[in-house]
């Protein structure tokens, strides 16, 4: 437990401590540089550039806040349609809404950039067919376009969180309001929203934090109109141009300001949801989630859903495919299909040794970080869940859950500073191990899942194991760990998929020798990459990468489902009438279960098994 707690402290606290020190001890690195001295010069410089300061605050608030608002509205509407209405093909709609989650973020941003290209973008080509749209219907580099694109790329996450909230809301309360004479707007304002408020606030805060740490859309679209967005600003400050020094101290000051903002937002969420159980509406008797009849609104709703799927899945993937089979940017037409298409980019990708090397690094980094996070989180969660409540256990529980309040941009920059500071002693900067450690900062996801799963395991099982002669460590290894394994493996899969899709963290930490596939794809589509620039191969690589993530993710989910089904079949297999299913004592007694399990293991050891 001490080792697990120390690992989580190193993952979460130490990088942020280095960032705070860098903010007050600059202007370059805080240690190992003769010019470093304590002071507030970085904040004085920040405030001295008032126009830039307020521009970053305003642009970031407009970008992240607008994208969060639009994303929540779309996610809530889609969740309402699939859960609380009689819309046709609701299962198909749910599957299509989840499709963008499978596509890596840098690939989604690349697909939208190709789809909205002023001359050759397929969406702009379609809009030109309409009257009164002009030569360039949508400017992909305008600031409002950035907000809409960010919202479209981030709908799936709030959708997945809102669906269970709506599923568990008892519709009879709304029916009672309407029977009492309340209109639909009044029912929504006085019944529905107060019931959903804690859950929706949590979704909004987490979506806001995720948007604040997202670098893909600002990097590809916002070099001009979005240059004041926080994520891009931080990245530019540490990516020194030729003849310039990186401004680590100023970047650390910016990071500290936005870390305070996200921390305040996180505590507002905790305070607002502390009495969430008062709004619980799921009960035993009489609970029934009602279904609203759409009636004449069924056709408009399905058109809106179809437009969403077209914009987030169909057209982006088509734009990627079209870019992959054309040697240069060209508008879609029958002549282009017949005379300018080729599939050589896919062959070039499969023959590219760096593609396979970066893919191998991606799997290694994602797998290693998921394993590190899950092991440390599971051990610490078990220790805290089984400890007596105290100030220290509550503080450790809050600390282990705190990474959800740290945007990926700040986490990547803080890890970058940490590895730069310790590099003279421990040379980790730019290595694969550094990326594994950095990716593991999402340990809170594994911790919360393991903590909840531990609370569901009765203490009597461990007490029975100890009474049967097992040590506490053996009880954890033989009783608790197998029971936690399905939850831990499911979280491991999610962290692995997040790791394969990650772009923001390696943007701060990776080098050409350690870059994962997401960074190699960016090098392929970035015109500043010189000899690596190859947009058709970049698009082909993005499609192949998406397909691999889909196969690996769903393959692991299938393995987990099969293991769970097999375990359930073993536990609930056919038993002869009147026979004891354990072949011994009362099966309802947990001590009997553990005693028999330990006894069989001991007997097996004696028989040489």
Image: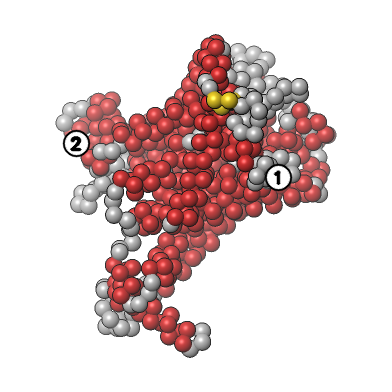
Residue 397 vs 410, above or below: the answer is: below
Q: Residue at x 52, y 20 (%)?
A: 40
Q: Residue at x 18, y 28 (%)?
A: 181
* Quadrant that contains the N terminus: bottom left
**Nearest-to-viewer mark from 1 and 2:** 1
The percent coordinates of residue 260 (x first, y second) are 44, 28
Q: Residue at x 64, y 53 (%)?
A: 364
Q: Secondary structure at mark 2?
A: helix
Q: Which mark is residue 114?
A: none
Q: How is the image coloured?
A: secondary structure
How many circles with numbers are drawn on the protein? 2
The percent coordinates of residue 379 (x first, y second) are 44, 57
Residue density around tag 1, few if under 14, some if 14–19, many if 20 or more, within 10 Å: many
Q: Is residue 404 left or right of 430 when viewed as pictured?
A: left
The percent coordinates of residue 85 (x first, y second) are 36, 39
Q: Circle 2 is placed at which residue position?
A: 176
Residue 503 vs 46, above or below: the answer is: below
Q: Quadrant of residue 227?
A: top right
Q: Nearer the viewer, residue 349 or 61?
A: 61
Q: Quadrant of residue 401?
A: top left
Q: Is residue 434 visible?
A: yes
Q: Circle 1 is placed at which residue position?
A: 514
Spatial CA distance of label 1 from label 2 is 60 Å
Q: Is residue 442 visible?
A: no
Q: Is residue 198 left or right of 152 when viewed as pictured?
A: left
């Amino acid at each position: 437990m001490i080792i697990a707690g120390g690992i989580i402290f190193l993952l979460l606290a130490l990088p942020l401590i280095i960032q705070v020190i860098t903010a007050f001890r600059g202007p370059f690195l805080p240690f190992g540089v003769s010019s470093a001295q304590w002071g507030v010069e970085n904040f004085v410089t920040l405030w001295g550039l008032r126009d830039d300061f307020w521009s970053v605050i305003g642009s970031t608030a407009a970008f992240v806040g607008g994208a969060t608002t639009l994303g929540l509205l779309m996610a809530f509407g889609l969740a309402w349609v699939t859960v609380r209405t009689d819309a046709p093909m609701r299962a198909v709609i749910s599957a299509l809404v989840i499709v963008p989650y499978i596509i890596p973020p840098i690939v989604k941003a690349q697909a939208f950039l190709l789809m909205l290209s002023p001359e050759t973008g397929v969406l702009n080509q379609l809009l030109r067919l309409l009257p009164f749209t002009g030569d360039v219907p949508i400017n992909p580099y305008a600031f409002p376009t950035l907000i809409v694109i960010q919202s479209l790329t981030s709908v799936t996450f709030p959708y997945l969180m809102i669906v269970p909230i709506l599923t568990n809301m008892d519709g009879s309360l709304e029916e009672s309001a309407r029977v009492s004479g309340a209109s639909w707007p009044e029912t929504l304002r006085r019944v529905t929203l107060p019931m959903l408020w804690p859950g929706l606030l949590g979704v909004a805060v987490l979506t806001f934090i995720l948007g604040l740490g997202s670098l893909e859309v600002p990097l590809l679209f916002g070099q001009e109109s979005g240059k004041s967005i926080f994520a891009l600003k931080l990245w530019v400050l540490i990516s020194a141009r030729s003849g310039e020094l990186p401004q680590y101290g100023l970047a650390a000051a910016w990071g500290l300001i936005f870390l305070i903002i996200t921390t305040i937002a996180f505590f507002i969420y905790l305070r607002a949801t502390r009495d969430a159980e008062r709004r619980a509406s799921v009960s035993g008797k009489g609970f029934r989630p009602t279904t609203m009849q759409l009636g004449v609104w069924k056709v408009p709703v399905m058109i809106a859903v179809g437009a969403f799927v077209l914009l987030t899945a169909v057209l982006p993937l088509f734009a990627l495919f079209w870019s992959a089979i054309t040697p240069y940017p060209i508008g879609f037409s029958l002549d282009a299909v017949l005379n300018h298409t080729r599939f050589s980019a896919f062959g070039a990708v499969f023959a590219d040794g760096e593609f396979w090397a970066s893919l191998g690094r991606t799997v290694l980094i994602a797998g290693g970080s998921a394993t590190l996070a899950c092991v440390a989180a599971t051990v610490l969660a078990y220790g805290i869940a089984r400890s007596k409540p105290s100030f220290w256990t509550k503080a450790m529980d809050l600390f282990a859950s705190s990474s959800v309040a740290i945007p990926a941009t700040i986490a990547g920059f803080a890890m970058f500073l940490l590895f730069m500071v310790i590099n003279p002693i421990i040379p980790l900067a730019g290595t694969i191990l550094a990326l594994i450690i950095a990716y593991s900062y999402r340990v809170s996801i594994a911790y919360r899942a393991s903590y909840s799963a531990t609370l569901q395991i009765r203490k009597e099982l461990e007490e029975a194991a100890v009474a049967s002669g097992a040590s506490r460590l053996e009880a954890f290894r033989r009783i608790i760990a197998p029971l936690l394994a399905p939850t831990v493996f499911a979280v491991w899969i999610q962290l692995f998929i997040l790791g394969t899709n990650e772009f923001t963290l390696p943007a701060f930490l990776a080098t050409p020798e350690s870059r994962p596939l997401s960074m190699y794809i960016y090098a392929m589509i970035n015109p500043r990459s010189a000899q690596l620039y190859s947009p058709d191969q970049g698009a082909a690589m993005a499609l192949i990468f998406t397909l691999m993530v889909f196969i690996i993710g769903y393959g692991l989910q299938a393995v987990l489902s099969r293991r769970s089904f097999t375990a359930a079949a073993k536990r609930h297999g056919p038993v002869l009438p009147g026979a004891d299913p354990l072949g011994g004592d009362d099966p309802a007694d947990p001590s009997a279960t553990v005693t028999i399990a330990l006894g069989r293991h001991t007997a097996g050891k004696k028989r040489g098994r």
